[in-house]
Amino acid sequence: HVLIHEIGHHFGLSDDDMERIEEAAE
């Protein structure tokens, strides 16, 4: 899920935030 992390960092999200987003997206 590199794309999500690239987008997440662009929006200033933390790794923990992105993990929750990835879990919610599945």
Image (spheres, grey):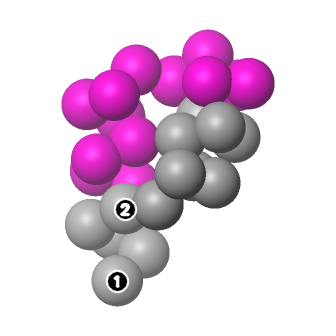
| Image position of 22 (left or right of 13) | left
Which residue is identified by label 2? 22
Q: Counting other residues with Cα less than 10 Å from the Cα at mark 1, is it few (<14), some (14-19), or many (20 or more)?
A: few
Q: How many marks?
A: 2
Residues in magenta? 9-21
Q: Is residue 15 magenta?
A: yes
Where is residue 11 shown, x and y percent of the image? 70, 25
Residue at (47% x, 60% y) in the render: 1
Query: How far separated are the C-alphas under marks 2 and 1?
Result: 7 Å
- Is disc 2 placed on a helix, strand or loop? helix
- Name the residue type under label 2: Glu
Is 18 placed above or below 4 here? above
Q: Along the line of sight, which residue is nearer the eye, 25 or 4?
A: 4
Q: Along the line of sight, which residue is nearer the eye, 17 or 15?
A: 15
Q: Quadrant of the C terminus?
A: bottom left
Magenta stretch, overall SS: helix
Q: Counting other residues with Cα less than 10 Å from the Cα at mark 2, is it few (<14), some (14-19), or many (20 or more)?
A: few
Where is residue 17 shown, x and y percent of the image? 35, 34
Q: Residue furthest front?
A: 2
Where is residue 23 shown, x and y percent of the image? 26, 66
| Image position of 23 (left or right of 7) | left
Label ID, residue 8: none
| Image position of 6 (left or right of 20) | right
Residue at (74% x, 24% y) in the render: 10
- Whether the residues at callouts 2 and 1 have beta carbons within 8 Å, the answer is yes
Which residue is identified by label 1? 26
Q: Residue furthest bottom?
A: 26
- Name the residue type under label 1: Glu
Residue at (61% x, 24% y) in the render: 9
Q: Quadrant of residue 18?
A: top left
- Is disc 1 placed on a helix, strand or loop? loop
Q: Is residue 16 magenta?
A: yes
